[in-house]
Amino acid sequence: MRLPKEFRFDTDTVLVHREGGAVILEPVREWPAGYVESFTGVPEDFERPAQGNVEKRRKL
């Protein structure tokens, strides 16, 4: 899904977080302090979806 032109950012990376019932997107030029150090990877209990037939979609 793409954002409407008036809501697009001039960066490829955004932070996503919730504030109450709202989902907030913020442009990021660099990772927040401590983010990379705190990332532990994929949790052990993460379940990958079954790799069945790939759904073909038309280009937007």
Image (cartoon, rainbow, N blue to C red):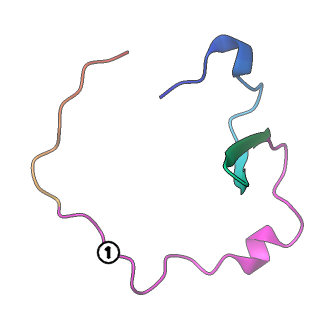
Q: Position of residue 32 (x, y in %)?
A: 85, 60
Spot the residue most to the left: 53
Answer with the quarter of the image where residue 45 lies. Answer: bottom left
Identify the residue at image location x=18%, y=64%: 50
Which residue is more in the foreground, 31 or 46? 46
Residue hosting label 1: 47
- Is the magenta region chiefly helix, strand or loop? loop
The percent coordinates of residue 5 (x first, y second) are 66, 12
Q: Is residue 34 magenta?
A: yes
Secondary structure under tag 1 reads loop
Q: Position of residue 43 (x, y in %)?
A: 48, 82
Q: Position of residue 53 (x, y in %)?
A: 10, 47
- The residue that appears at 81% across and 57% down in the rendered structure is 31
Outermost residue on the right side: it is 33
Q: Nearer the viewer, residue 52 or 19?
A: 19
From the viewer's perspective, tell me whether residue 50 is left or right of residue 23.
left
- Within 10 Å of disc 1 (Cα), the crowding (few <14, some 14-19, many 20+) is few
- From which residue to which does the magenta span run? 27-50
Task: Please determine whether, in this image, residue 18 is positioned above or below residue 33.
Answer: above
Quadrant where the image shows the C terminus: top left
Name the foreground residue: 59 vs 20.
20
Q: Is residue 8 left or right of residue 57?
A: right
Residue 33 drawn in magenta:
yes
Direction from residue 46 to residue 3 in the image, left or right: right
Up/down of 6 relative to 54, above or below: above
In this rendering, the answer to whether 4 lies above or below 35 is above
